[in-house]
C-alpha cells in the first residue's frame, strides 16, 4: 500500500468513506489477487493526479469481510466510486491505465 492511498477497515469505512467531504474511490482487493496487484500502481497514479479532488481508499477483503459483503463485492478487484456517501459507479476487474483514468474522469464529471 502506498502513502498515496488510504487503508480503510470495516470499522473506519463509515467515517472515512461514507462521511468523506469529497468523492472516494474504494478499491476492494486482496494480497493473493494478481489483477489487484496490477491495478495498484495505476490507483497510486490516480491518487496523485487527483490529490485534493478524490480520495483513493483500499479495503483488504480478507481482513475486512463485512464491508465487501455490504456492497455485494463478488469479484476482485472491485472499484466503487462514492459521492456524498453513496455508491455511484462500480467497475469489476483489472483494466488498462487509460480505461481506468477515462472511467474515473467521466464518473467525477457526473
Image (cartoon, rainbow, N blue to C red):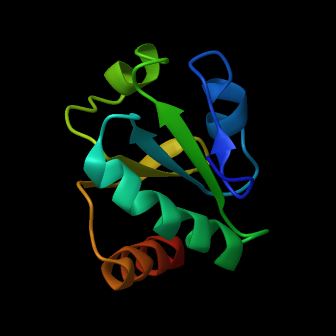
Please state if 47 lies on the left or on the right of 76 as rendered.
right
Please state if 8 lies on the left or on the right of 96 as rendered.
right
Q: In which quarter of the image is residue 95?
A: bottom left
Image point (48%, 69%), residue name: 42
Residue 33 drawn at (x, y percent): 29, 41
Image point (51%, 79%), residue name: 109
User: Is 9 situated above or below 21?
Assistant: above
User: Is 43 situated above or below 68?
Assistant: below
Quick one: 48 or 73, which is closer to the camera?
A: 48
Image point (66%, 79%), residue name: 49
User: Is 105 situated above or below 69?
Assistant: below
Please state if 102 lies on the left or on the right of 64 as rendered.
left
Quick one: 49 or 3, which is closer to the camera?
A: 3
Quick one: 35 or 6, which is closer to the camera?
A: 35
Image point (27%, 60%), residue name: 94
Residue 91 drawn at (x, y percent): 28, 56
Amino acid at each position: 500500500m502506498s502513502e498515496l492511498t488510504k487503508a480503510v477497515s470495516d470499522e473506519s469505512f463509515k467515517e472515512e468513506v461514507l462521511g468523506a467531504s469529497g468523492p472516494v474511490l474504494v478499491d476492494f482487493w486482496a494480497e493473493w489477487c494478481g489483477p489487484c496487484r496490477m491495478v495498484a500502481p495505476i490507483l497510486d497514479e490516480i491518487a496523485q493526479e487527483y490529490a485534493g479532488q478524490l480520495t483513493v481508499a483500499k479495503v483488504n477483503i480478507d481482513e475486512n469481510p463485512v464491508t465487501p459483503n455490504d456492497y455485494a463485492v463478488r469479484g476482485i478487484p472491485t472499484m466503487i466510486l462514492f459521492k456524498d456517501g453513496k455508491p455511484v459507479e462500480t467497475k469489476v476487474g483489472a483494466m488498462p491505465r487509460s480505461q481506468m483514468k477515462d472511467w474515473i474522469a467521466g464518473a467525477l464529471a457526473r
